[in-house]
């Protein structure tokens, strides 16, 4: 498994924004525009974490997440769903489908870094972005 973060997002602008927000984590960020390309990328070089949008061309994020979870090689890949759909049913659906995290757009960069840090097991980054009570 590689150390990179895979961003599956159909907007190149949002891909660039995510890459800028995550560069301080010291991991390369690779972006793809659709679900089928994401599956090819994961097969060729599995990332340390995938960030998925729901509204993707070719294959939506729900189907991509389902395929990731069903694959014995990638099933444990940490996945953060990042979507413009703020309704609670989307959060519940992400949880039901096995996502490890859920965030909505627009997002706060510090909250994104904290969520990614937690999913990658980077306690220091998570604490820096979102200190525990009593630690500032």
Image: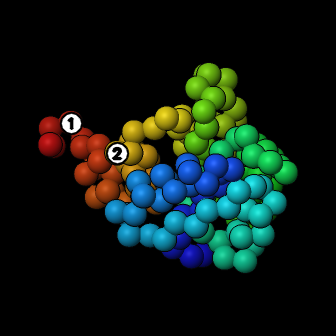
- Among the 4 quarters of the image, the one containing residue 24: bottom left
Left or right side of 134 for 55: right
Query: 29 or 15: nearer the eye?
Result: 15
Colouring scheme applied when the structure was drawn: rainbow
**Does residue 82 appear in this view?**
yes
Q: Vertically, is 134 above or below 22?
A: above
Q: Which residue is mark 2?
A: 110
Q: Vertically, is 39 above or below 3?
A: above
Q: Which residue is mark 1?
A: 133
At horizontal 49% and vertical 35% (from top left) the residue drawn is 106
- Among the 4 quarters of the image, the one containing residue 21: bottom left
Q: Position of residue 89 (x, y in %)?
A: 67, 23
Q: Position of residue 101 (x, y in %)?
A: 54, 43
* Separation (CA) of disc 1 from disc 2: 16 Å
At horizontal 51% and vertical 57% (from top left) the residue drawn is 16
For label 1, the SS is loop
At horizontal 34% and vertical 45% (from top left) the residue drawn is 110
Left or right side of 126 for 22: right
Q: Position of residue 84 (x, y in %)?
A: 60, 33
Contact between labelled residues 2 and 1, with CB atoms less than 8 Å apart: no
As drawn, the label of residue 56 is: none
Q: Residues within 10 Å of mark 2 (few under 14, many from 20)?
A: some
Q: Position of residue 104 (x, y in %)?
A: 54, 34
For label 2, the SS is helix
Of the image marks 1 and 2, the number of the one nearer the N terminus:
2
**Does residue 75 appear in this view?**
no
Residue that extends furthest to the front in the rendered view of this protein: 13
């Amino acid at each position: 498994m590689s150390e990179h973060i895979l961003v599956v997002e159909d907007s190149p602008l949002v891909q660039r924004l995510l890459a800028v927000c995550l560069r301080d984590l010291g991991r390369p960020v690779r972006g793809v525009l659709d679900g089928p390309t994401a599956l090819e990328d994961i097969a060729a070089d599995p990332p340390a974490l995938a960030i998925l949008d729901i509204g993707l061309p070719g294959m939506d994020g729900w189907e991509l997440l389902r395929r990731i979870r069903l694959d014995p090689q990638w099933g444990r890949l940490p996945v953060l769903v990042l979507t413009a759909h703020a309704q609670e049913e989307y959060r519940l659906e992400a949880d039901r489908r096995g996502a490890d995290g859920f965030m909505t757009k627009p997002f706060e960069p510090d909250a994104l870094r904290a969520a990614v840090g937690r999913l990658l097991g980077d306690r220091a980054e998570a604490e820096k972005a979102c200190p525990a009570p009593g630690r500032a």
